[in-house]
Image (tube, grey):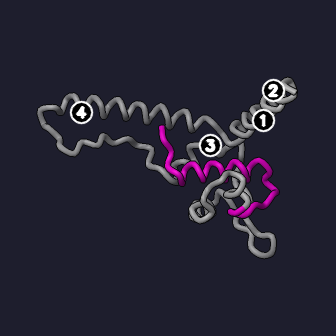
Amino acid sequence: MKLNKASLFGLISVLELASEPERQLSTADIADKYGISSHHLAKVMRNLVHEGVVQAMRGVGGGYRFAGNVNRTTLLDIIKLFETMESDLDMPHWNKAADPVVEELQAITNEIDTVTRAILDTITLATALKNTRLRAELASQKEVSKG
């Protein structure tokens, strides 16, 4: 599965903000940390604000803060804001004689989409953040053991 940039930036932003829900970050803070386009991220953040996932904080030191529930918000909730999550076979010259083959391939891709959605819908932000912390701890332990 390949996520478009908006989905990826949305996930990064939401996970970054949800890791410390009381903290405010600007688009520049997030963009600089992850080396992504601040301009594109600003568009993503507007969408996340519109959907109520993050809250825009105005004024000096303004930015964004996570507004959801880390235990209930799933990766699918965020991705669906930016993607249709449905595969479509790109058949520019459809040959009607090949219909059964194409129909089977479309059925297979539909099943893959269903399984992918089901998995993404089971992974909450809390789970993703927990796994992120575990990865960071393991990386830290590896560095200590090397030195």
The magenta segment is 1-28
Q: Quadrant of residue 46?
A: bottom right
The mark that comes first in sequence, 1 or 3, is: 3
Query: Earlier along the polypeptide chain: callout 2 or callout 3?
Result: 3
Q: Earlier in the sequence, mark 4 or mark 1?
A: 4
Q: For the residue labelled by badge 4, is the local secondary structure a helix, a strand or a loop?
A: helix
Which residue is the site of mark 3? Answer: 74
Determine if residue 64 is in view: no
Label total for image: 4
Q: Nearer the viewer, residue 22 or 34?
A: 34
The one of 28 and 51 positioned closer to us in this rendering: 28
User: Mark 1 — residue?
Assistant: 136
Work out how far the residue at label 1 is from the one at label 2, CA to CA, in angstroms. Answer: 10 Å
Which tag, 2 or 4, sits closer to the chain's start?
4
In the rendered image, the vertical position of residue 62 relative to residue 8, given as above or below: below
Q: Position of residue 5 (x, y in %)?
A: 53, 52
Quadrant of residue 30 within the rendered picture: bottom right
Residue at mark 2 to residue at mark 3: CA–CA distance: 30 Å
Disc 4 to disc 1, how far (Cα)? 44 Å
Disc 2 residue type (three-letter): Lys
Q: Amino acid at mark 1?
A: Ala
Q: SS of the residue at dot 1?
A: helix
Left/right of residue 35 with respect to residue 80 in the rendered view? right
Marks 1 and 3, how far apart at CA: 21 Å
Measuring from the top left, give residue 22's x and y in whole percent: 82, 56
Quadrant holding the C terminus:
top right
- Residue beneath the point at 75% across and 32% down: 135
88 left or right of 19 in image: left
Which one is closest to the eye, mark 4 or mark 1? 1
Query: Which mark lies nearer to you, 4 or 3?
Result: 4
Q: Could you say which disc has been placed on residue 102 in the image?
A: 4
